[in-house]
Structure formats: C-alpha cells, structure tokens
Image: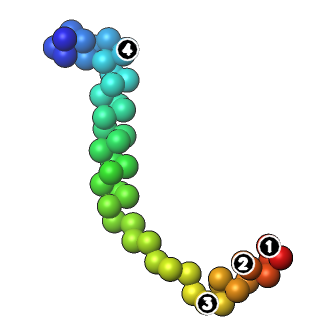
Amino acid sequence: MYDQRFFKTKLGRAALASVFAMSVFAALSSHITVTAPSASLATLQITEIA
C-alpha cells in the first residue's frame, strides 16, 4: 500500500507532510517545561475573575 507510487499522489504527499509536522511538534513540545505561576500572578488572576 505505501509504495513509491502512493507517495507521488496528492494524498501520499499530504500523509508525508502530516507525519513530518507531527514529528516536529513532538520534538518541539518535549523542550517545553511547565512551571507553576508565581503567587502574585495567581492573586492577580483571582481578583480579575472576582
């Protein structure tokens, strides 16, 4: 099914682009670190909501 002829079609190129995009997303998202907000920022958000 996934032969050279398939990847020459529009659908095959879209599949390759999708796999490439997901690979880049996974690589970039592994570098993001989640940190807890500071106390002053949390207080600011609470006062805006109330």
* Residue 41 in the image, given as x and y percentages of width and height: 65, 84
Task: For marks 1 and 3, give the CA distance.
Answer: 16 Å
- Of helix, strand and loop, which one carries label 4? helix
Q: Are marks 1 and 2 in contact (CB under 8 Å)?
A: yes
Q: CA distance from mark 4 to mark 1?
A: 48 Å
Colour setup of the view = rainbow
- What amino acid is found at the position of numbered circle 1 in the picture? Ile
Please tell me whether residue 42 is drawn above or below residue 31 in the rendered image.
Answer: below
16 sits to left or right of 40: left
Instruction: Indicate which disc, 4 or 1, sits on the residue closer to the N terminus.
Output: 4
Q: Amino acid at mark 4?
A: Lys
Crowding at dot 3, Cα within 10 Å, few <14 / some 14-19 / many 20+, comes out as: few
Res. 4 image quadrant: top left
Question: Residue 10 shows which numbered tag?
Answer: 4
Q: Residue at position x 56%, y 81% from top?
A: 37
Image point (65%, 83%), residue name = 42
Q: Is residue 27 visible?
A: yes
Question: Is residue 4 in view?
Answer: no
Percent position of residue 27, x then y: 30, 54
Q: Which residue is disc 1 drawn over?
A: 49
Q: Secondary structure at mark 1?
A: helix
Secondary structure state at the residue bearing disc 2 = helix
